[in-house]
Structure formats: structure tokens, C-alpha cells
Image (cartoon, rainbow, N blue to C red):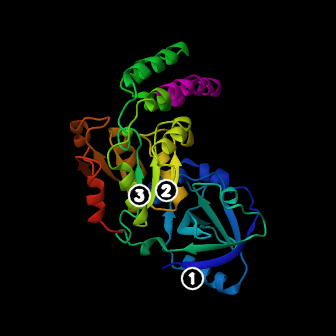
Amino acid sequence: MGTTLRGTVQSGRREAAGFLALPWVADQLRGKAGLVPYPGTLNVRLTDSAALDAWRELRGAERGLRLASPNPAFCDASCFPAVVNGRVRGLAVVPCVPGYPPDVVEVVAAEGLRECLGLADGDEVTLTLTDASSEDPDAERFSCVLFDFEGTLVDFQWRLADAEAELRGELAKLGFDLEPFARDNYAVLRTRALELAPSDEVRELVDQRFGPIYDRYDADALSRWSLIAGARELLGALRASGRRLALVTNIGRRAIERALPAFGLDRAFDAVVTRNDAARAKPSGDGLLRALGQVGQSPRNTLMVGDSLSDLLAARDAGVFVAIVRGGESPAADVQRHGPDFLLASLDEVAHLLRSEQP
Ligand SMILES: [Mg+2]
């Protein structure tokens, strides 16, 4: 049960982006609410007295999620899970300062809400708010399922060793010491190079050099991929059960846009997040959280289905449950050491698992 507030969009003071970029704010939004925020908030002015009363009551109960400032120069903030116009999940954030306007609600989400909902100043919006403590963790178990692509829905064909050797070669040419990269896979090589790059110029060069290499190995794998038996039927059945489905893959957009129609999967997902859509590829949880923002679901109700250690670590990073299917990229023993929530013999078992975990 939520509290529905109606109001109108107004321009804010544009201070929100700076606040959301503070490391402690970003860390706590991610850790406590599973949200990687878009750098800006949607400001909503409540216009009718019923909305003002309901908002005052919700705030007064002090049951929002608390963002606690480690620095006395900044105030704490209180957050309430919010769904905007029935479509996009976000958080209503209230700075805990005396004199904060009682008729203003600032909403943060994974996406820019103005762009994603086509909103302009003066437009009416509805916010459905819940107090964080009333969310039942088991109410909608696995109402959302995230799927990895290669090794999970299609067989694994990427030529890992060749690609990684080529990527290391580029790092050497760019002047990186290769020692810190010794244990990194193709995805972590880029993430770490961006972290260690001495300047924005070098960061840009990393992406300029890596992008075409990734795309070439994707295209090579695309020429050999075949769909895992039962994958299309599984996705269709999960969709028909009312669950939200998203694809979160380290494959690039170019190959995925060709692969999905080729396998009859172009309408299988509510959201598709490729390597090109997330700041950091898996094993970071960035792409998973991005997908959850797009489908309006919370990590605690979500299952990630993948075939690799990267999927497992990404799921942990994003705070979602994880099922690993044997026989893909990572040997079962490697995965087992990290204790997945479920280790499945085949993709078919996802249906059995979810049947016993009805949403
Ligand atoms: Mg995979």
C-alpha cells in the first residue's frame, strides 16, 4: 500500500547533482536502496491540501531510509521509495534541515525522469510513496528476473584468450604497467584501466582502442552462437507469469541488436542493458541496477540468472539473488566457492526454481 501524491513539475535549484555526487551519498543510495542515481532530481510541487497532509504525515513518521552524513558540514537526508507516474521507480529524498519547503518533493531515479517520462515544467505527475520500513521483503520474491546472454541463453563462443591478449597489448602501447592487470578478464581490464589512467585523455584512448576490439570479438561470437534449448520458451513463460525480465550483458549493443531478432528474442525483455549502456561491465553491479531502474523493480525481489563468476559477483554488488547455470563460462567449482544462491544443472531448472517461488 502506498500513499499517492499529485503535484506539478517545477525547476529545482540545481543543487541536487552535487549532493548526489558526494561519495557518501552515492555509496548509501547504492547500498541501502540499490540505486545508482542519475545526477539530478525531479522537483515536484504539491498543490492540493490532501497531498500536503499526506506528505507531512509520511515525513513526520521518520520511517524513511536514512542517509547519514559522516560530515557535519552536510545534513542527513531521509528517503522514501517512490514510483513516478506508475512507471519509474525512484526515491523521494528529503534533506533533514529546518525550513525545508513542506510542499516540495525531490525525486531521484536511475534515469533522468524528465527525459524518460517526457516531462516539462508545469506538467502534472503522480508519486506513489511507501515508507521504507513497511516494505515486505518476501512480498514479491523474484517478481523480476535478470538474464545474462552469452553462456546462459546462447552458448559461449567468445575467444577469451585471444581478446585478452589483444587488450593487454593495447594497454602496453598506452604505457600502462601490466602487473596490476595480471588476473583481470576482458571486462575488468577496461574497468581497471579507466581507474588507473593518469588523465582523461588516456581514459578516452582506452575506450577508443578497446571498443572496436570488443565489437570484433562480439561479431565473431555472433557468427557461431546458437540458442540454448528451451531458452525462448522459458522467457515466454516467465513473461506470461507477469514477471519483469531484463537482459544484462557484457556483449555490446551492436551484436545484441542483431542477435535478439535472429533468435526470436526481440520482444522477450522489458529492458536490455549492454556493455555500452553501463559505466562498468559485470562483475560490477552497475548494469543490473540500471536495468532495475528501467523496469521499476527492487533488488530484493530480483533473481539474476547467469553462467559466470562475473554474474555472481555483479549480483552480489547489486544486492540481488543469483542462480548460476553450469556448463557456461565459469567452471562450477569456481562458482561454488563463492556460494551462489542457486546452482542449476541447466537453464530448464530456472522454471522449476521460480515455480516454487511464485511472486
Ligand atoms: Mg555469460
Screen quadrant of the C terminus: bottom left
Mark 2 CB lies closer than 8 A to ligand 1? no
State which quadrant residue 308 falls in.
top left
Residue 236, numbered circle: 3
Measure the alpha-carbon separation of dots 2 and 3: 19 Å
Residue named by callout 1: 57
Looking at the picture, how far across and down is residue 102, in whole percent? Answer: 68, 76
What residue is at 70 percent from the left and 69 percent from the top?
A: 44
Q: Is residue 103 visible?
A: no
Mark 1 CB lies closer than 8 A to ligand 1? no
| Mark 2 / mark 1, whichever is N-terminal | 1
**Label 1 sits on what residue type?**
Glu
| Mark 3 / mark 1, whichever is N-terminal | 1
Looking at the picture, how far across and down is residue 206, in whole percent? Answer: 57, 24
Q: Is residue 246 above or below residue 119?
A: above
What residue is at 47 percent from the left and 60 percent from the top?
A: 33
Residue 203 is covered by the magenta coloring: yes
Residue named by callout 2: 292
Q: Main secondary structure of the magenta part?
A: helix
Query: Which stretch appears magenta?
Result: 194-217
